[in-house]
Image (cartoon, rainbow, N blue to C red):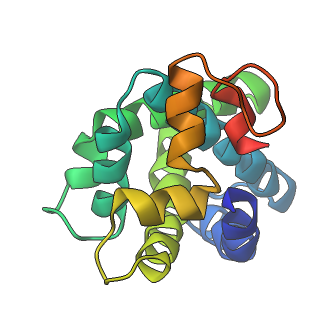
Amino acid sequence: MLESIIDAVKSEVISTVKERTGLGPQEAEKTVPLAKDSISEGVTSALSGGNIGGILDMIKGAGGTTNAGGLVENAVFQGIAAKFVHKLTGQLGLSEGVSQKVAGIVLPMILSKLAGKTREAGDTDDIDKGSLMDVLGMDAGAILGGLLGGKDKKGGSGGLGSLFN
């Protein structure tokens, strides 16, 4: 589902990045898969640390259901942003300042869309664990089984890395 969410906002993200940072079309387009990878890695890391609450708070912050600044103050978001900035500087050769600006544009746009989809997936207009798991294509049993050393849906050993495939 993350892939489809990113596909839905890709052209808007590219356009906004070009407009606000002065990056060329090719560079702006290359930021999108790096953002996806950073979000996937950050969420997986938070899940492996048992921090589903931090992920939920991040999504709520992106959806505007918490105080202003809630997203940027969130530890999971900060970790994702740091990964993204590192990828932008290392793989695209962007300066630290431009990379931080790109991260400040791209990540909130994607996470806001994710928050909207999460809200739509729930039984209410609130963002909750069940709707977040649905949108991310996860099931709580698979996560708990993986964390506790159980088997995944394909019969392999449990693990969080397979949740985003």
Q: Nearer the viewer, residue 16 or 134?
A: 134
Residue 110 pos. (x, y %): 55, 62
| Relative horizontal placement of residue 26, taking residue 80 as reference (left or right) | right
Vertical arrangement, residue 76 with respect to residue 62, above or below:
above
Marker count (numbered): 0
Is residue 85 visible to the viewer in this orientation of the structure?
no
Residue 91 pos. (x, y %): 78, 27
Which quadrant of the structure image shows residue 153? top right
Residue depicted at x 17% and y 63%: 66
In the rendered image, the residue lying farthest to the left is: 67
Q: Nearer the viewer, residue 110 or 102?
A: 110
Quadrant for the C terminus in the image: top right
Residue depicted at x 54% and y 42%: 141
| Relative horizontal placement of residue 151, taking residue 20 as reference (left or right) | right
Residue 101 pos. (x, y %): 48, 47
Residue 61 pos. (x, y %): 28, 59
Residue depicted at x 44% and y 51%: 104
Quadrant for the N terminus in the image: bottom right
Vertical arrangement, residue 137 with respect to residue 114, above or below:
above
Q: Nearer the viewer, residue 107 or 54?
A: 54
Is residue 102 visible to the viewer in this orientation of the structure?
yes
